[in-house]
Image: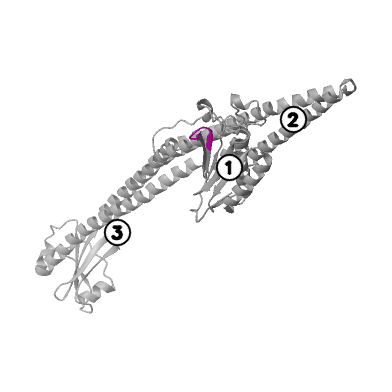
């Protein structure tokens, strides 16, 4: 059963219950009023006869029928040839004095539904009856009217419910159609038209937001694959060229062969670094558990490694004990990439200053700094400034740093350092320092 049909049925059911309740209320109120009028009429007539017994013979209360009963329980005609009413045990009990008071009840007289009152009268009783046929006919007509009105109300409610549900669920149908088309075409550029307000409009907005995020993600993936293919093509082409030359190594001088082997080794290292960076960006840390990490220890270890990697550059560190929640391997990678970047740009004999405080890692080099036009792009994947194209690297190092920072709820920025050089800041959620040491 569709949601639209369920909404229409619910609307019809609610209206049916309300109409039924109203109809029953109207029916019983009118029934009570009509019967009350008859009761008042026959009780008034009976009371008059009790006060003036001879008035029973005068008539004037049509359509009432009067029957007198003597103290033996025998009926007494009110006039010659007058119709008589059946006298049963209950009436005889009032007439003979076996029962006190009077009563009013429904009865059947010659097959006609009637209402009668029995009241004591001197040495007997008086019975006043009136047919309920007009009341029953009126109530039958009312029943028919109420049934027809109820059925019409339910039908109108069902139709209205179907129309309202159709209009209300139009955004859902558009969402369903859009989802089906996107699943068929694989193109998330389509958007759902937003109309009106309320929860369904918010749903359309959320759906469009999701499609925008999906489109951006797919576009990022396409760019990533295209950029990776482009970056891999250069070292692969160089490797292929050098291998073709080595096939003719008997024609090469020993010095040329050594140079070719050195080029092959360098290109293989570049390939390895590029593939490692690509895997690092593709993997992320979605499936890796975060644990408390001593950021100061990671930085100290990376500084020792950088001193070995760049023996002609002085690395000076000032660290405060800092704990952050994160993935140790990824934080180590991010810190190392910052130090490696600084080491490549710092002239031999210059200093790289590293500090950790308040959950922030600062790396300041004394190189040429970052040009203003490059500052906004240094953390983009595969981006290499004009001055960096002569240096080894894949253009992924700082992109990995930003990826790690964002995955840990932090940020990374690059700015010019006072006095020259570049200052890179990796900010993470960390504890306040409780001490420091220099190295």
Q: Residue at x 46, y 39 (%)?
A: 203
Q: Which mark is residue 323?
A: none
Residue reaching furthest to the front: 349
Residue 83 in view in this figure: yes
Q: Nearer the viewer, residue 215 or 117?
A: 215
Which residues lie in the magenta part?
416-423
Q: Position of residue 54 (x, y in %)?
A: 10, 66
Residue 81 in view in this figure: no
Separation of marks 1 and 3 at Cα, in angstroms: 93 Å
Q: Main secondary structure of the magenta part?
A: loop
- Residue 4, compared with residue 327, is above or below; it is above
Q: Nearer the viewer, mark 2 or mark 3?
A: 2
Q: Determine contact: label 1, label 3, CB under 8 Å.
A: no
Q: Nearer the viewer, residue 372 or 407?
A: 372
Separation of marks 2 and 3 at Cα, in angstroms: 113 Å
- Residue 394, compared with residue 5, is above or below; it is above
The residue that label 1 is drawn on is 404
The residue that label 2 is drawn on is 267
Label 2 CA crowd tier, 10 Å (few <14, some 14–19, many 20+): some
The residue that label 3 is drawn on is 113
Q: Nearer the viewer, mark 1 or mark 3?
A: 1
Examine the image and state in which quarter residue 148 appears. top left
What is the secondary structure assignment of the residue under circle 1?
Answer: helix
Direction from residue 380 to residue 110 in the image, left or right = left
Direction from residue 100 to residue 431 in the image, left or right = right
Q: Residue at x 83, y 22 (%)?
A: 245
What is the secondary structure assignment of the residue under circle 3?
Answer: strand
């Amino acid at each position: 059963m569709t949601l639209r049909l369920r909404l229409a049925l619910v609307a019809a059911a609610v209206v049916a219950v309300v109409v039924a309740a109203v109809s029953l209320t109207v029916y019983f109120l009118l029934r009570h009023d009509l019967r009350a009028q008859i009761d008042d009429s026959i009780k008034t007539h009976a009371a008059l006869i009790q006060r003036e017994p001879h008035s029973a013979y005068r008539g004037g209360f049509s359509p009432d029928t009067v029957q007198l009963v003597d103290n033996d329980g025998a009926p007494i005609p009110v006039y010659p040839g007058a119709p008589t009413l059946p006298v049963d045990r209950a009436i005889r009990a009032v007439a003979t004095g076996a029962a006190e008071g009077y009563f009013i009840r429904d009865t059947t007289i010659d097959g006609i539904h009637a209402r009668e009152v029995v009241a004591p009268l001197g040495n007997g009783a008086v019975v006043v009856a009136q047919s309920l046929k007009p009341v029953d006919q009126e109530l039958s007509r009312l029943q028919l009217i109420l049934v027809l009105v109820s059925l019409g109300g339910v039908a109108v409610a069902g139709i209205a419910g179907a129309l309202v549900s159709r209009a209300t669920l139009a955004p859902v149908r558009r969402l369903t159609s859009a989802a089906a088309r996107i699943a068929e075409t694989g193109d998330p550029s389509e958007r759902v038209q937003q109309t009106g307000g309320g929860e369904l409009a918010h749903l359309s907005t959320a759906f469009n937001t999701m499609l925008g995020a999906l489109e951006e993600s797919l576009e990022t993936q396409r760019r990533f694959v295209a950029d990776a293919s482009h970056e891999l093509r250069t070292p692969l082409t160089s490797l292929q060229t050098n291998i073709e030359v080595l096939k003719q190594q008997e024609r090469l001088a020993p010095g040329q062969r050594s140079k070719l082997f050195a080029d092959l080794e360098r290109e293989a290292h570049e390939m390895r670094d590029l593939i490692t960076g690509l895997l690092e960006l593709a993997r992320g840390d979605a499936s890796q558990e975060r644990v408390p990490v001593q950021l100061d220890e990671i930085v100290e270890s990376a500084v020792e490694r950088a001193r070995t990697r760049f023996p002609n550059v002085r690395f000076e560190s000032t660290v405060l004990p800092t704990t952050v929640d994160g993935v140790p391997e990824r934080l180590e990678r991010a810190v190392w990439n910052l130090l490696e970047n600084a080491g490549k740009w710092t002239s031999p004999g210059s200093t790289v200053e590293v500090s950790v405080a308040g959950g922030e890692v600062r790396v300041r080099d004394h190189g040429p700094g970052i040009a203003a036009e490059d500052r906004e792009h240094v953390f983009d994947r595969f981006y290499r400034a004009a001055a960096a194209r002569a240096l080894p690297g894949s253009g992924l190092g700082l992109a990995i740093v930003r990826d790690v920072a964002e995955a840990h709820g932090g940020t990374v920025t690059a700015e010019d350092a006072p006095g020259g050089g570049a200052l890179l800041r990796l900010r993470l959620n960390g504890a306040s320092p409780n001490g420091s040491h220099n190295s």
